[in-house]
Image: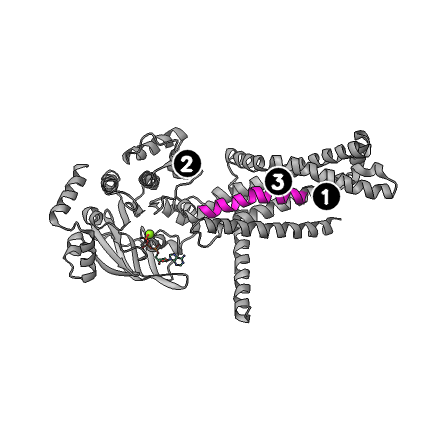
Amino acid sequence: MPDRAPSAHASIADATEVTISAGGRPIIEQATFDVRRGEIFAIMGASGAGKSTLLRTMVGLAAPSRGVVRLLGQDPYQMPGNALYALRRRVGVAFQGGALLGALSVIENVELPLRLNTRLDPATIRIMAHLKLELLNLRDVDGLYPSQLSGGMAKRVSLARAVVMDPELVFFDEPAGGLDPQNAAELDTLILKLRAAMKCSFVIVTHALDSALAIADRIMIVEHGRVLALGTPAEIRALDDARIAAMFGRTGSSSVTERAAYLDRLTAGL
Amino acid sequence: MSPTSLATTLQRRVINLGAMGLFLGQVLRRLPHRAARAGTLAGLVVAIGSRSMGLMIVAGGFVGAMLAVQFFDTLSRFGSPSMLGAAVGLGLIRELGPVLAALIVLGRAGSALAAEVASMRGSQQLDALACMAIDPLAYLMVPRLIACLISLPLLTAIFDVAGLLGGMCIGALSFGSSAGIFLDSAASGIGPADVRMGFVKSVVFAALIGWICLGKGFLAPAVRGTEDVSRVSADAVVIASMSILGADYLLSALMS
Ligand SMILES: Nc1ncnc2c1ncn2[C@@H]1O[C@H](COP(=O)(O)OP(=O)(O)OP(=O)(O)O)[C@@H](O)[C@H]1O
Ligand SMILES: [Mg+2]
């Protein structure tokens, strides 16, 4: 695979004119964007806009009907199975509902990728899994089963499992979905903490404008399957678009002071 | 049904069948490479076995007793009631044992397998495995298929034994033939070819249950909720039971 010459903004994942169809109709149309190494890239949009669908295509689970996606410089739909598995070891995915294996306990879920993808001995694997669980403020949950976890805990366990192989790029669908504001803010802190600790990039799908503005380096807004805007939080804020203004209006916390306070809360936790 | 909708239904059936065939091929390709961990496998065998063990004993006993009643009447008319053991044993080992044990395991464990895999599809556990660079076919499907292949022949043997005992009890209690005569007759009447036929049948039925239940769950298109899960599992049970009966006829015809 030819690696592109490293540019100022080395791209870690990108999509070029990607159209994704499901059930005979396009869900995402003509999406073009790139995710840069080291950044937190937020995908925002209303429910049903096609964010999770886009994420599935980016991680190699559902081929686009047109266009090209690349993951760590490679097209996951144009490679033999074993190369795809090698690529996937370098990418972590936390799904919207957690997708924890119901038959395994929390610790077994987190250990699973290490157990099946490495030759480390069980004791080492246990230590590495605990390290990630602790990084995500999860203590004394080892023996619990997914059905015994709260929504917020399941999301954090799922994130711990996604990062246990120390991936270069982590996809996280709806970190804040279904969480109360305090838990959601806590998860934002944890994402920043993880990035600082692991030097990885994040693609985060979210509804929460507050959270996106606070932690993302760049934000992409998707509406009805199309990319409406893409830019830094400052650029997004400055956009003169009625639809985006409406998003700010709805959140009710777009005032500068509130956002500054939110950011303070977040960074205080680091 | 209009011709076009008939055509699309037919087309969908063919595509589904193709997908199921592909699924089987992919699972079989992984059989040699990726022998399941012994612990996982033992757990699955126990899970399938413990679900159906009691049923095997009860159903086997009743079926054996029923056969004894049926055959005693027939055999008496032809003057050879001492052949009761052989008649009951052959009926069990060649025909009813494999088929009924398979149908019971299908209803008990096969439907649960289909529902389990379909709900894993719905909650994206299968996708999550793929994203963790873990092949869900090797990790989940292969051990479950092997567990079916191990469990069903064992359960069938239990069914057969329970049936023989049931038949023997009825023979002794109702018809006054001694247990010794019954067992002698069974032992002399049943040959290796009969045992082989029963074994081959139960292995084929186990493969059908594993393939159809796992495949239906794995390939389930849009699993959004519990209705979808139960629909997938009901579909799998219907298709698998028809396949078992069809295969039973074919194997009986081929191996007699
Ligand atoms: N397999 C499918 N077949 C048909 N339509 C689908 C399929 N999967 C998703 N869709 C449709 O695609 C659209 C986008 O779904 P998606 O799950 O990507 O939305 P989302 O932006 O993630 O929403 P949410 O914020 O609620 O998670 C929805 O209208 C959905 O009904
Ligand atoms: Mg979604």
Which residue occupies the foreground of this view, A190 or A198? A190
Which residue occupies the foreground of this view, A34 or B5? B5
Question: Badge 2 local density, few (<14 within 10 Å), some, or many (20+)?
Answer: some
Give the structural element (helix, strand or loop) at label 1: helix
Q: Is mark 2 within 8 Å of ligand 2?
A: no
Q: Is residue B99 magenta?
A: yes
Magenta-drawn segment: B98-119
Q: On the image, numbered disc 3 is attached to which residue?
A: B152
Residue A99 position within the rendered picture, expressed as x and y whole percent measured from the top left: 39, 44
Q: Is residue A257 magenta?
A: no
Dominant SS of magenta comes to helix
Residue name at image x 29 percent, y 32 percent: A134
- Tell whether B193 sits left or right of A62: right
Q: On the image, numbered disc 1 is attached to which residue?
A: B94
Q: On the image, numbered disc 2 is attached to which residue?
A: A115
B4 over A64 or under it: above or below = below
